[in-house]
Image (cartoon, rainbow, N blue to C red):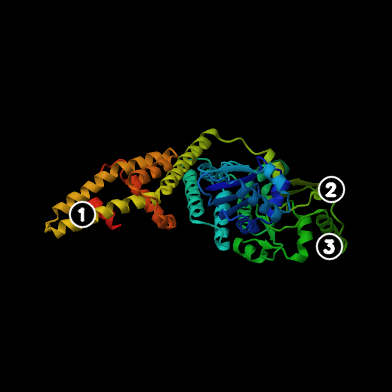
Amino acid sequence: MLICLTASHKNAAFDLLERLSANAEHAAPRILDGHDAVRGAVVVATCNRFEAYLDLDAPEGASPVPAVHEAIRAVGTVAGLEADELRATFGFVHGNAVAGHLFAVTSGLESVVVGEGEIAGQVRRSLERARRKGTTTPELERLFQRASQTSRRVKNETGIGGEGRSLVRLALDLAESRVTDWAATRVLLVGTGRFAGASLAALRDRGVTDVRVHSPSGRAAKFAAGHGIEAVPRGEYATAAADADIIVTCTTAEHHVVDKALIAVGREQLEASVALLPGATAPVREVRQLVIDLGLPRNVAPDVVDVPGVDLLDLETIKIHAPLEELGATDAAREIVSRDARAFGDLGEERDLAPAVVALRRHVYGILDGEIARAKARGDDDGRTEAALRHMAGVLLHTPMVRSRELARAGEQAAWIDGLEALFGVKPDEAARGASDATDAAAARDIRSTDASGPATADESRRADAS
């Protein structure tokens, strides 16, 4: 059973999201340790959401609530938050709806800026992190891989991301009123991760040429060399911050990288450097600086606005000004998401019947092999009896396979399984329950293969028997 616990800009304050995201990488292992029913967990933490995708091994009819409560408690422990507060905040998605939710998230349909391009990479890296920590499962792998495929389809088939919309670009749109000439604007970029690359690209698209970069973790020189800009060493950081017209922060640091004290010290250093020049006097000019904080946890201390001439543009402000969805492109994107989610759910329901399908085929072909052996013992070596028997087995299996798919789509797999046991004494193959993802998918294909094509031929039955 798939479960999603979700907190986003739609149902949670940014302060809470900040706390959840700060230690998100430690959440999945803690969730697995919390309850025996949790087989896997993948945590997606971005600048405007925190989500935990769980794979529960819950017996049929058993309630997932105890495992979910333990998962919430584990997240709270990691984030230093009370479980009651999280229970009141988290949205809860389960069953087939989980696929639709993740596919929409990965396609940018649930972002602050609808269609923003960064989220697909963030979701992909969340799965990679779960792999490294050993917290994923075949079902979660299937879910996240399908989500990536859907996001690519949305990007390629709709215009929702055609303008390269993102938080970075929206922030710069909001900064337009403060900038008279982008080409003459001095920008300091703080951070060197993937978001930094997107920020630099967006700045250059607007004609900015004077960009310097500083990294709290010491990676500025490498980033600067790769992007053709100048790196700011630690000793010159305050001065560079005070001298910039715009500061863009996008680091994963868990502490503030820009605050009131930094700007104040930087301005003092600038004034002192001018005073040291013979006969020089400090220029009198109106200082106007814009600090754009794209980090979560917050990169910028709230007190920075106490410095004269400094304005702060953070995620909460960006959210308020997020543009309305472009209805046509969004509707087309949601149709793709809905269609792909249905296909994911249909295959999952068919896979639930895979052990019973294996057991039925084994039962029928076991009888078939016995009859063929007896025919050969009687001297029937020309193959006609074997061909007739294999064809008959295919005809007999056709209707049960079609009904299995119909009942799976209706959520009534148990009726099909109970019918097998009542009529033939056949029970789901326990070995098949532990089969690999590929084996289960093959069994699901067996269910689908007879849906529209009619009974199998003798050759098809022979191939099915051999498989």
**How far apart are labels 1 and 3 at the CA level?**
99 Å
Marker disc for residue 306: 2
Q: Are marks 3 and 2 in contact (CB under 8 Å)?
A: no
Q: Which mark is residue 371?
A: 1
Q: Nearer the viewer, residue 91 or 182?
A: 91
Question: What residue does disc 3 label?
Answer: 273
| Of callouts 1 and 3, the N-terminal one | 3
Q: Residues within 10 Å of mark 1 (few under 14, many from 20)?
A: some
**Pointer 1 and pointer 3: residues touching (CB < 8 Å)?**
no
Give the number of the mark in front: 3 or 2: 2
Q: Is residue 149 left or right of residue 460?
A: right
Q: Nearer the viewer, mark 1 or mark 2?
A: 1
Find the distance from the CA under tag 3 to the CA under tag 2. 24 Å
- Residue type (three-letter) at the residue carrying disc 2: Asp
Residue displayed at 33% across by 41% down: 402
| Dot placed on the residue nearer the N-terminal end, 3 or 2 | 3
The residue under the point 25% across, 51% down is: 461
CA distance for labels 1 and 2: 90 Å
Mark 2 lies on a secondary structure that is helix
* Residue 446 in sight here: yes
Total marks in image: 3
368 vs 105: above or below: below
